[in-house]
């Protein structure tokens, strides 16, 4: 009987921790999956990965190493076939074009990571 109570309490605590982590991930990064954002952040901070795609749907979110700056973003977008449209840039909102397709994204950077989130 006592083991079942501890098991139920443990499950409830795990669920609450996951819900709090999900709320934090959505609020801070706009990423629904807290596991994806946590692993992505660790790969950028500890493993020194250039960039990590942490969410593709409903919109793309990428964490990147801040040392590369916008050059890393430009090379990422070039790999996808896009080029920057300088005259449509508005502050931290960058615009890239591939033929008729236009993608706008927010570019945020601090001392630990850079975050690119599509609109």
Image: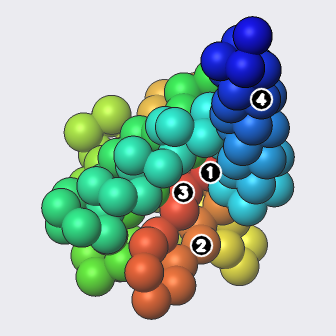
Seen as rendered, the residue at the extreme front is: 1
Q: Label 1, on which residue?
A: 117
> Does dot 1 land on a helix, a strand or a loop?
strand
Residue 90 makes an appearance in the image: yes
Structural distance between the alpha carbons of marks 3 and 4:
38 Å
Q: Is residue 92 above or below residue 12?
A: below
Q: Are marks 2 and 1 in contact (CB under 8 Å)?
A: yes
For discs 4 and 2, the disc positioned in front in the rendered view: 4
> Does dot 3 land on a helix, a strand or a loop?
strand
Going 70% across and 26% down the picture, which residue do you hit?
Answer: 6
Give x and y (percent) for residue 90: 73, 72
For discs 4 and 1, the disc positioned in front in the rendered view: 4
Q: Label 2, on which residue?
A: 108
Q: Nearer the viewer, residue 5 or 94?
A: 5
Q: Are marks 1 and 3 in contact (CB under 8 Å)?
A: yes
> Does dot 2 land on a helix, a strand or a loop?
strand
Q: Label 3, on which residue?
A: 116
Going 76% across and 54% down the picture, which residue do you hit?
Answer: 24
């Amino acid at each position: 009987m006592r083991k079942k109570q501890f098991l139920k309490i443990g499950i409830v605590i795990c669920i609450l921790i996951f819900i709090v982590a999900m709320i934090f991930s959505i609020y801070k990064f706009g990423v629904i999956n807290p596991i994806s954002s946590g692993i992505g952040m660790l790969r950028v901070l500890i493993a020194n990965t250039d960039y990590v795609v942490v969410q593709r749907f409903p919109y793309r979110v990428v964490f990147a190493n801040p040392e590369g700056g916008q050059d890393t973003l430009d090379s990422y977008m070039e790999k996808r076939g896009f080029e920057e449209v300088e005259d449509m840039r508005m502050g931290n909102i960058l615009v890239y074009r591939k033929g008729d397709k236009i993608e706008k994204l927010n570019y945020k950077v601090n001392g630990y990571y850079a975050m690119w989130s599509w609109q």
